[in-house]
Amino acid sequence: MSRPPPTPAGRQKRNFAKRHVRPSDDGAIYLYGLHTVEAALGNAKRKKVRLLATPNALARLGLTEATAPVPLTLSTPRDLDRLVGNDAVHQGAVLEVQPLARPTMKALAEEASLIVLLDQVTDPHNVGAILRTACAFAADAVITTARYAPQETGVLAKSASGALDQVAFIEVRNLGEAITELQAEGFFVAGLDSEAEKALPVGRPAPKTAIVLGAEGKGLRQKTRELSNAMYRLDMPGTIKSLNVSNAAAICLFALSR
């Protein structure tokens, strides 16, 4: 039985995010968890390097040593713990991949009808959960900024539970320019804010709709508010008027899909 490569040098650090998102020197990423690995294996656009799996996980993926579609290294749970960290819920499966190629903004704007934009949402767990929700409600893409946003990593992919390989995840240099470009292609851009005067409508306000969500605490930046076509709040009857951004995204997409 072959062994996985040596553990990255920084694995002992306590920083959870750094330990789990570290790519290999050539830019490869370690995706882990059965749903995440299965979705990546099924994505023809994803370049797969090798699969590291326990015999049990391989069977749960519906594969054998003979039918594995990529080079396979049979591993033990302890092998995989050393590779991706003891806190990573890998379920016996780790897939080494290259980052996905992403569509251009122009191509996306021409073909999409529902998009989620994130204004400096930095937590990879939140962004992953939003990707999962976007996939569930048939959104075409999630857009973040290149700075103040998480990269494509194992932590984000695990939180997305396979959605990273099913929904376009795009980075833009300037969110304001992206909003303007979407509006030029006929998108109605709706910002979400707990103190907005208007409640979020049921159903899309326009055939091509983009929603913008901001980071917890800070919310949307002023320029993002000014560029949005309208600002809405989630109409909640309880005493708490704001939610975790991933929960807010789920409610918002549910309302727009009605």
Image (spheres, helix red, strand yellow):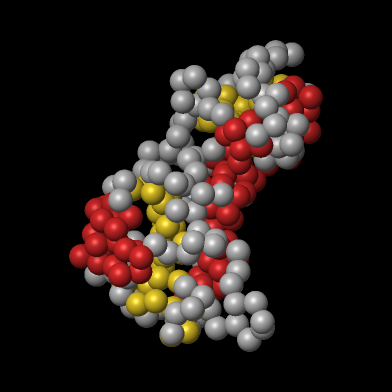
Which residue is drawn at the image coordinates 68% and 41% (left, top)?
A: 34
Q: Position of residue 86 (x, y in %)?
A: 75, 31
Which residue is drawn at the image coordinates 61% and 38% (left, top)?
A: 17
Vertical placement of residue 132 versus 20, above or below: below
Which residue is drawn at the image coordinates 42% and 57% (left, top)?
A: 119
Residue 105 seen from this side = yes
Front one among 190 and 5: 190
- The image quadrant where one finds the N terminus is top right
Residue 54 seen from this side = no
Front one among 140 and 82: 82
Q: Position of residue 102 (x, y in %)?
A: 36, 43
Q: For this view, does 28 lie left or right of residue 5?
A: left
Front one among 23 and 63: 23
Vertical placement of residue 175 versus 44, above or below: below
Which residue is drawn at the image coordinates 60% and 64% (left, top)?
A: 244
Q: For this view, does 168 lie left or right of residue 74?
A: left
The mark total stands at 0
Quadrant of the rendered image containing residue 230 = bottom left
Q: Position of residue 44 (x, y in %)?
A: 45, 39
Q: Position of residue 132 (x, y in %)?
A: 56, 56
